[in-house]
Image (tube, rainbow, N blue to C red):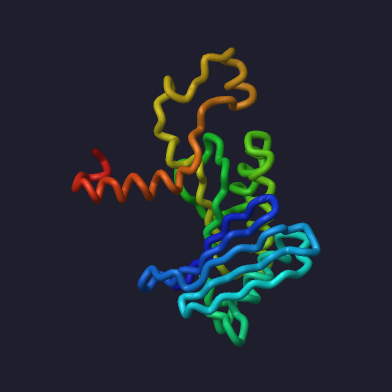
Amino acid sequence: MKILVLNCGSSSVKFQLLDMTDEKVVAKGMVEKVGTSAAIITMKTYKDDSIRETREILNHTQALSAVIGCLGHPEYGVLKSRSEIEAVGHRVVHGGERFAHSVKITTEVLDDITKCIELAPLHNPANLSGISASIALLPDALQVGVFDTAFHQKMPRHAFIYGLPYNLYKRWGIRRYGFHGTSHYYVSRVAAEWIGRPIEE
């Protein structure tokens, strides 16, 4: 099974293609300056092939199309067909209080991510653009949202409520959410392994 992992920013798309039979990174790269006529695409593969191209890429759909084109390129690509991509994991910056785990992307999930735009106005719109592009270009692939705020959802109430008028939390959701949860998830497990302790401790 091959999984494409996407991190869509306002003007960039970072990606990795993973082969889950041995959890190997097959290819990784980035599209920078999305929205310009001088966007830069870079990719490195497990075969040590690397490419760097400059071209016009005006939106996330064009950026993801360029990524898929590089992955399936007849000379340096690593896919025979885009149908080899069975799942796409999307980094989503803000999941509010709704998401404590990774979830399959549905219409309801997209609506909830949209509601969090006011909490992450620079990030969630780009994340949504990447998800929409992926659904359009890879319609048969499972689409999964992975939320930076999910790791911290077990924070106790006294730790996430700020010393501000309570109605700011009730009305606008202003509270501590915690970010970079995917990194915290990984680092905490590696640390537990290194010191020989169960992660639950």
Where residue 15 sits: x, y (%)?
A: 56, 63
Task: Please state which of residues 124 and 36 is positioned toward the viewer in this rendering.
Answer: 36
Q: Residue at x 47, y 25 (%)?
A: 160
Q: Quadrant of the C terminus?
A: top left
Q: Residue at x 64, y 38 (%)?
A: 120
Instruction: Classify residue 200 as left or right of residue 113.
Output: left
Instruction: Classify residue 51 as left or right of residue 45.
Output: right
Confirm whether residue 170 shows in the render: yes
Where residue 139 sits: x, y (%)?
A: 63, 68
Confirm whether residue 87 shows in the render: no
Residue positioned most to the left: 196
Task: Please state which of residues 94 and 86 is positioned toward the viewer in this rendering.
Answer: 94
Task: Please state which of residues 182 and 105 is positioned toward the viewer in this rendering.
Answer: 182
Q: Residue at x 57, y 59 (%)?
A: 6
Q: Residue at x 63, y 70 (%)?
A: 67
Where residue 63 sits: x, y (%)?
A: 69, 64
Residue positioned most to the bottom: 74
Instruction: Classify residue 3 as left or right of residue 108.
Output: left
Where residue 59 sits: x, y (%)?
A: 75, 59
Q: Quadrant of the N terminus?
A: bottom left
Q: Is residue 174 above or below residue 121?
A: above
